[in-house]
């Protein structure tokens, strides 16, 4: 259990996360305006999104399907009847004066998510609920000395709010949760998970307590929009609360803002008085009713998700558990690996993808989908190792040439004459030459200096430009020195 | 149901409606009467009745995921009290 040491003893963090995930769709949740990111301001706004009088919301069926798909991916209950409510508050980027959301009857109920911890353990985190709601517009505060600018392009885009149980116990678990949730959303294709563009945003609820005691008073931290900031915000906020409690104070339940430039949280007093949302069912929208058969159809089309894929990689390809976790984090990486591994040595394929390929991709800042070496070509390289055309050491050289030129492994081996020497005659000749040249060392070896064997191997490999089959060299050399 | 002045003042603040102090008493009486009137519905026993959301057997209509609207920022901004560079402008609101 991760605990924090204070001046007066140990403290435990209790954390629950609310993740806002933008649904991948062409049109908004209740209007026909586009959801594309980065358009000219207010160019993707319908009269519904601008809340002009008399406009009525009409739900986008695909957004409902995406929410159900996400719920199924989180092994959650799907509620066949759910209700849209109005959450009332005033803010310049919310033209309706209320957000259409779901309060007492969300579309998705209890589910679960498994997180992988650094020590290899797996922990189950409860999902409380998932509900659908509208996103707000965007305010820009730095464009003018006395005014804020408002762009409503984001207003009305469909969001899923995914709420976790307070099951997380520290920054490692919280970041593992968000990483895993993002991975699942991307596999499902229901949210692109892009935190830079705000497609995935996170609010952190945190309290501290003495281990084993009941929950303390929590604070909600808004605006935590990267994995790194989640870690920073949690570390800062836990320390802040512990200091107050150890000084004999009490925690005020409040909303706080994470200030990324200072790495600290601060109180958002203004939000407090507005915290009376007066939820009530939206009279413009009838209850959302789903058929079980429709839900079952969606379930039948779910892709293989990271946990199942990981298990399969371990069982079918013999990949170590940790490596399997790395491979399945992105669907693209998993697909790439599987093309390389199919019909080949899975563990070797995994080593090449995670080791050599990731190394060069990271160095050049490329995604796996942009790799100059395709999965098929990397597979071709593995085939040449498997059939003894080249040794593992030469393979590294071929791999680098493949990266530079984009050519196939076979072509590079032919062009550069890297084919492994497996002809015993040629190897014998090379060995004879080395032994004749190094006759003094041969004497030393025969008089008991066994360590020199490695020296002879090295000389033979050098003489053959590294192309001699190392296993054959060993055999023949042992016989000749015998 | 009776309504006090403090509650009326709070509701007015939440709804951003300016109500002068001297009108609070009067409004509290009126709102209390309206609530009392609606409360009469509570006399009917609805313990085993599903909530009714309509009388026509109509269900929520669904729309296809197609872009059919937008692309007219000038119309969106045409009634705005303030607009610059395609944005609405408002008094600075920053945390």
Image (tube, coloured by chain):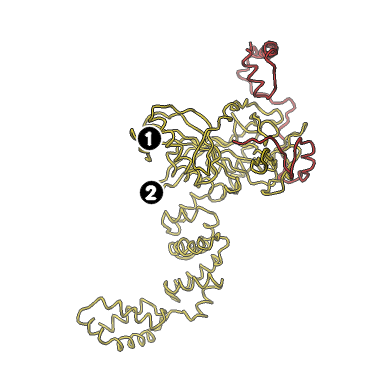
Chain colours: A yellow, B red
Seen at 42% across and 59% down, the residue is A318
Question: Which residue is under mark 2?
Answer: A119
Horizontal side of residue A419 vs A84, given as left or right: left
Q: Which disc is residue A354 wearing?
A: none
Which quadrant of the structure image shows residue A289? top right
- Residue A155 in picture, x, y percent from top left: 68, 39
- Residue A110 in picture, x, y percent from top left: 52, 35
**A112 vs A281, nearest the viewer:** A281
Seen at 38% across and 41% down, the residue is A2
Q: Is residue A344 above or below residue A28?
A: below
- Residue B2 in picture, x, y percent from top left: 63, 10
**A276 vs A169, nearest the viewer:** A276
Q: Is residue A174 above or below residue B31?
A: below
**Residue under disc 1 on the same chain as residue under disc 2:** yes
Which chain hosts label 1?
A: A
Q: Is residue B40 visible?
A: no
Seen at 54% across and 73% down, the residue is A408
The span from disc 1 to disc 2 (Cα, nearest Å) is 21 Å
Q: Where, quadrant-wise, is the N terminus of chain A in this rendering?
A: top left
Horizontal side of residue A102 vs A313, given as left or right: right
Which chain hosts label 2?
A: A
Seen at 42% across and 71% down, the residue is A392
Q: Is residue A155 above or below residue A417?
A: above
Q: Which disc is residue A11 wearing?
A: 1
Disc with the residue nearer the chain's start (1 vs 2): 1
Q: Is residue A210 above or below residue A187?
A: above
């Amino acid at each position: 259990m991760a605990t924090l040491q204070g001046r007066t003893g140990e403290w435990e963090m209790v954390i629950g996360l609310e993740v806002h995930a933008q649904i991948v769709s062409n049109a908004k949740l209740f209007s026909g305006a586009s959801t594309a990111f980065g358009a000219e301001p207010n160019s993707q706004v319908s009269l519904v999104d601008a809340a002009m009088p008399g406009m009525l919301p009409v739900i986008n069926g695909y957004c409902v399907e995406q929410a159900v798909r996400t719920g199924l991916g989180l092994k959650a209950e799907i509620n066949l009847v759910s209700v849209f409510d109005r959450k009332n508050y005033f803010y310049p980027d919310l033209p309706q004066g209320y957000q259409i959301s779901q309060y007492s009857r969300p579309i998705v109920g209890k589910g679960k998510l498994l997180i992988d911890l650094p020590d290899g353990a797996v922990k189950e985190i409860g999902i409380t609920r998932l509900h659908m709601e509208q996103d707000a517009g965007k305010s820009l505060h730095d464009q003018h000395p006395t005014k804020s600018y408002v762009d409503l392009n984001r207003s009305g885009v469909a969001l899923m709010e995914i709420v976790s149980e307070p099951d997380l116990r520290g920054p490692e678990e919280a970041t593992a949760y968000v990483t895993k949730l993002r991975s699942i959303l991307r596999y499902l294709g229901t949210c692109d998970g892009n935190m830079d563009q705000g497609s995935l945003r996170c609010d952190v609820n945190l309290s501290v307590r003495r281990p084993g005691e009941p929950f303390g008073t929590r604070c909600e931290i808004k605006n935590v929009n990267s994995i790194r900031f989640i870690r920073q915000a949690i570390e800062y906020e836990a320390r802040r609360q512990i200091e107050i409690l150890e000084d004999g104070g009490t925690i005020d339940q409040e909303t706080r803002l994470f200030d990324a430039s200072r790495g600290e949280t601060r109180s958002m007093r203004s939000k407090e008085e507005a915290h009376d949302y007066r939820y009530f069912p939206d009279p413009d929208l009838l209850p959302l009713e789903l058929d079980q058969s429709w839900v079952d159809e969606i379930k039948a089309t779910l892709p293989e998700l990271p946990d199942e894929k990981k298990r399969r990689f371990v069982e079918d390809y013999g990949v170590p558990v940790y490596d399997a976790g790395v491979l399945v984090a992105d669907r693209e990486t998993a697909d790439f690996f599987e093309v390389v591994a199919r019909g080949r040595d899975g563990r070797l394929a995994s080593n090449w993808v995670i080791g050599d390929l990731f190394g060069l991709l990271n160095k050049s800042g490329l995604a796996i989908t942009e790799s100059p070496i395709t999965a098929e070509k990397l597979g071709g390289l593995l085939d040449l190792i498997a059939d003894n055309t080249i040794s593992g050491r030469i393979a590294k050289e071929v791999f680098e040439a493949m990266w530079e030129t984009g050519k196939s492994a076979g072509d590079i081996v032919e062009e550069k004459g890297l084919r492994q020497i497996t002809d015993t005659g040629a190897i014998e000749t090379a060995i004879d030459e080395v032994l004749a040249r190094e006759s003094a060392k041969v004497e030393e070896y025969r008089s008991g200096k066994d360590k020199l064997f490695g020296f002879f191997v090295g000389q033979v490999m050098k003489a053959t430009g590294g192309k001699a089959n190392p296993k054959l060299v060993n055999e023949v050399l042992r016989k000749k020195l015998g | 149901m009776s309504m006090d002045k403090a509650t009326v003042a709070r509701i007015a603040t939440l709804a951003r409606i300016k109500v002068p102090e001297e009108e609070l008493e009067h409004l509290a009486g009126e709102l209390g009467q309206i609530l009392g009137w609606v409360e009469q519905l509570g006399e009917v026993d609805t313990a085993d009745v599903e909530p009714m959301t309509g009388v026509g057997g109509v269900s929520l209509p669904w729309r296809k995921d197609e872009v059919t609207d937008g692309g007219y920022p000038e119309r969106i901004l045409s009634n705005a009290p303030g607009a610059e560079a395609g944005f609405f402008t408002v008094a600075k609101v920053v945390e």
